[in-house]
Image: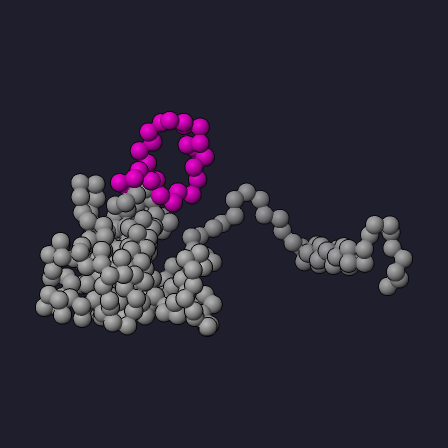
Amino acid sequence: MSKKTLPGVTRRQILTFTAASAVLGAAKAANAVSLKGTPVWSPFDASPPPQIETDGWVFFTDAEAAALEAIVDRLIPADELSVGGKDAGCAVFIDRQLAGFYGTYSRLYMKGPFQPGTPEQGDQSPLVPQQRYRLGLAGLEQYTQAEHKKSFKDLTGEQQDAILSGLQAGKIALNGIDSKLFFDIALKNTMEGFFADPIYGGNRNMVSWKMLGFPGARYDYREYVGKHNQKLDLEPLSISGGDAWKIKS
């Protein structure tokens, strides 16, 4: 192609215009149709949530699940506002997440070297979530058996709180894993399970959304945009389209 082009027009622009014209011509030749109105759309067409075919635990053993349910129930205890973490399905949520790509960090870069970093650098551990829970729950069982001759789930609420506080502060040593690392992921995932959409296993019967008055994942809020300072009393909706998502465990 000659280097002589219009002033201010580059060779790359000419090629781009030519390619666009070819695409438009091909579309016309193929009798392309213009869509009007609202396209047909179904939830999760592109990214469906994981389908769990069992009512039981997918990642945890029964013993691990019992310990985790005791943990989430102390992190989110039942009160006059809502049920506790166990009845809200937080352990079920964590179990389902660990069985998916989150459990192995398959979407994150996980190559070394792994070196201690500053707090601003974030998590530098080579352990993926599945390993953190497996090692953490095993280390917790060893600790409580050594100190109390019981499993964590069988301790009193006060004893459980004291242990969780020790883990959070890094004052209790667990075999195979840093105790604070284990506590931090358990707390983070418990909060996620309590407030996430019920389709993922937690927030059973939308307990946290009802407590907060959150209307959920509604498709269209245009009807309510102009209703300022009005109490709408909208029942929360899940992204599944249902008014609740009941999960057995």
In percent of width and height, residue 217 lies at 38, 45
Image position of 200 with respect to 82: above or below = below
Query: Is residue 54 at least partly visible in the picture?
Result: no
Asked if residue 200 can be seen in this view, the reply is: yes
Residue visible at 21% across and 44% down in the picture: 82
Q: Quadrant of the N terminus?
A: bottom right
- Residue 200, percent from left and from top: 33, 56
| Quadrant of the rendering where the C terminus is positioned | bottom left
Q: Is residue 16 left or right of residue 210?
A: right
**What segment carries the magenta color?**
210-235
31 part of magenta stretch: no
Q: Quadrant of residue 218?
A: top left
Asked whether 233 falls inside the magenta stretch, the response is: yes
| Along the viewing direction, whichever of 8 and 217 lies nearer the viewer | 8
Q: Is residue 117 left or right of residue 14?
A: left
User: Between residues 187 and 26, which one lies in front from this camera angle?
Assistant: 187
Total numbered badges shown on the rendered structure: 0
Q: Which image quarter: residue 237?
A: top left
- The residue at the point 34 percent across, 31 percent down is 232
Q: Residue at x 43, y 37 (%)?
A: 221
Residue 234 in the image: x percent, y percent?
32, 36
Residue at x-position 33% and y-position 40%: 214
At which x and y percent is residue 78? 18, 47
SS majority, magenta: loop
Query: Is residue 196 depicted above or below 61 in this figure?
Result: above
118 shown above or below 76: below
